[in-house]
Image (spheres, rainbow, N blue to C red):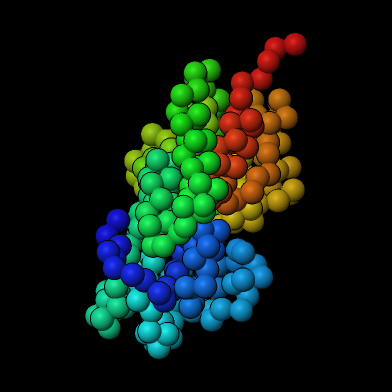
Amino acid sequence: MSGRPEGEVRRIVSLVPSLTEALFVLGLGERVVGVTDWCVHPADAVAALPKLGGTKNPDLSAIVALRPDLVIANQEENRRRDVERVRAAGISVWVTYPRTVRDGAALLREIARLGATAEAIREVVEPVEAALRVALARRPGPAQRVFCPVWRDPWMSVGPDTYAHDLLLLCGGENVFGARSDRRYPRVELSDVEQAAPDVVLLPDEPYAFGALDAAEMARLDIPAAHEGRIHLIDGTWVSWYGPRIRGALEGLSALLAPQRLT
């Protein structure tokens, strides 16, 4: 991470949907003056804010015109050249890059240091940190082999050195494509999925909106997850939104990835 300001920040542009939500949940929403088209939570609050394009193609002139004290970006979601152009305009940019759940929890506390009250920290930050401690202290059971795609046509899976990969490990999973080092989100074929033999398939609704037809296609594969009915459509923010949603993600995924009891 780089660029977090030390002084007071009154006007913030957020180019990271999960951190836009974090700012509002922490009581800092009135400082947010602009967001991306993908910043959709909290819905009522962000609806009234200027929309500044997508995470990959923000309207840089509109950002500069808002005269923010700080722009919050992400190394993976936002392009380096856009960050450099905003900085060239004399605007401070905080580039975040959490790659583990610990990083995500630490970032939430850093966001809180922009001016959140002690009460907000108790209600928002500390429960996330407590859930993380519980997950870290949990006695590991048999790891459940997990396939968690993020896209199709082509199929793309969660790879190593990603937030989602770390989250799956923390929740008791073994990412079946976690050893693929060719790219952070490796391309795979359905034949690769069958060969990997996942015990559980998780189909998030973002960034690709997997749905019932995709689940039915997975159910036709010769994999343990299909045979045992462990193909789940999940909230995509669980595996991609670091911030206040970490607690729910840890609890929800840990339940889905718990080893099945023999009857």
Q: Report the residue that reaches farthest toward the top.
A: 263
Q: Residue at 55% x, 58% y: name it.
A: 25
Question: Residue 48, position in %: x, y?
Answer: 61, 79
Is 142 drawn above or below residue 134 in the view shown? Answer: above
Question: Residue 245, position in %: x, y?
Answer: 56, 48
Q: Tell me the quadrant of the picture where the C terminus can be found.
A: top right
Question: Residue 153, position in %: x, y?
Answer: 56, 55
* Residue 129 shows up from this direction: yes
Snapshot quadrant of residue 254: top right
Left or right of 219 on screen, residue 137? left
Is 171 drawn above or below residue 218 in the view shown? Answer: above
Q: Residue at 49% x, 62% y: name it.
A: 23
Instruction: Out of 162 and 190, give the one closest to the viewer.
Output: 162
Q: Residue at 33% x, 70% y: name it.
A: 8
* Residue 158 shows up from this direction: no
Question: Residue 31, position in %: x, y?
Answer: 47, 73
Is 183 drawn above or below residue 112 in the view shown? Answer: above
